[in-house]
Amino acid sequence: MITIVAKTKVRENKKQEFLKITEELIQKSQNEEGCISYDLYEDIADPYTLTFIESWEDMEAIDLHNKAEHFMKIVPKLADLTEGEIEVRSYRPAK
Amino acid sequence: MITIVAKTKVRENKKQEFLKITEELIQKSQNEEGCISYDLYEDIADPYTLTFIESWEDMEAIDLHNKAEHFMKIVPKLADLTEGEIEVRSYRPAK
């Protein structure tokens, strides 16, 4: 299992737009083969810090996800709604 | 639901000790009232970055967790095994 934590800062006037266009991304990603969970969170201390926390069965499922039509259509649009870099960390169970 | 992402850097020679003493913390936390999930991960790009990802029903469950005997016994010991600050972010579903 691979868990991805992808943290970004949404522009204050773009949050609702970000939530709107990621609805489809989230729903379709959750239905993908190999997707264990795929959710969007906001930081309680800073509601403009938005973080996807996703768990996938393996790297193959993630590769398919990154080539999925909904991913390629929606994710590029998010850059205009956010500021600074998206911080993406990929995790596996600690051993 | 509240999801906590707590990221820390373990000293290279202390990782196995960290994993050993957090086994009890993880098992007992998972069995706590209000705990949805409680797991320890390592960053694939840097296996000395260890991150707890925990989901709790509400703040009350977290407060009880922070006063639990296993939490108070084990968590203080982790400071000696890690370097720098632990980064803790608390999230709720984005809205």
Image (tube, coloured by chain):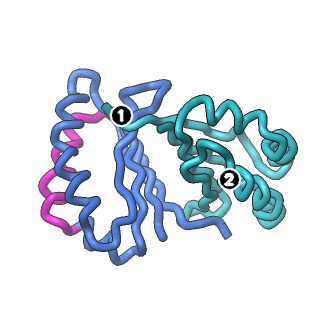
Chain colours: A cyan, B blue
Callout 1: SS: strand
- Judge whether residue A31 is colored magenta: no
Mark 1 sits on what residue?
A: B9
Q: Residue furthest front?
A: A33
Magenta span of residues = B67-83
Quadrant containing the C terminus of chain A is: top left
Q: Residues within 10 Å of mark 2 (few under 14, many from 20)?
A: few
Amino acid residing under circle 1: Lys
Which residue is painted at 72% across and 41% down in the image? Answer: A84
- Residue A62 is left or right of residue B85, and the answer is right
Q: Looking at the image, can residue A11 be seen? A: no
Q: Looking at the image, can residue A80 be seen? A: yes
Which quarter of the picture shows residue B86? top left
Q: Residue furthest top?
A: B13
To which chain does the residue with label 2 belong? A
Mark 2 sits on what residue?
A: A31
Image mark for residue B25: none
Does residue A56 lie above or below B59 as drawn? above
- Residue A29 is left or right of residue A43, and the answer is right
The answer to whether mark 2 and mark 1 are in CB contact below 8 A is no
Does residue B8 lie above or below A16 as drawn? above
> In the rendering, at what x and y percent does residue B23 appear?
20, 45
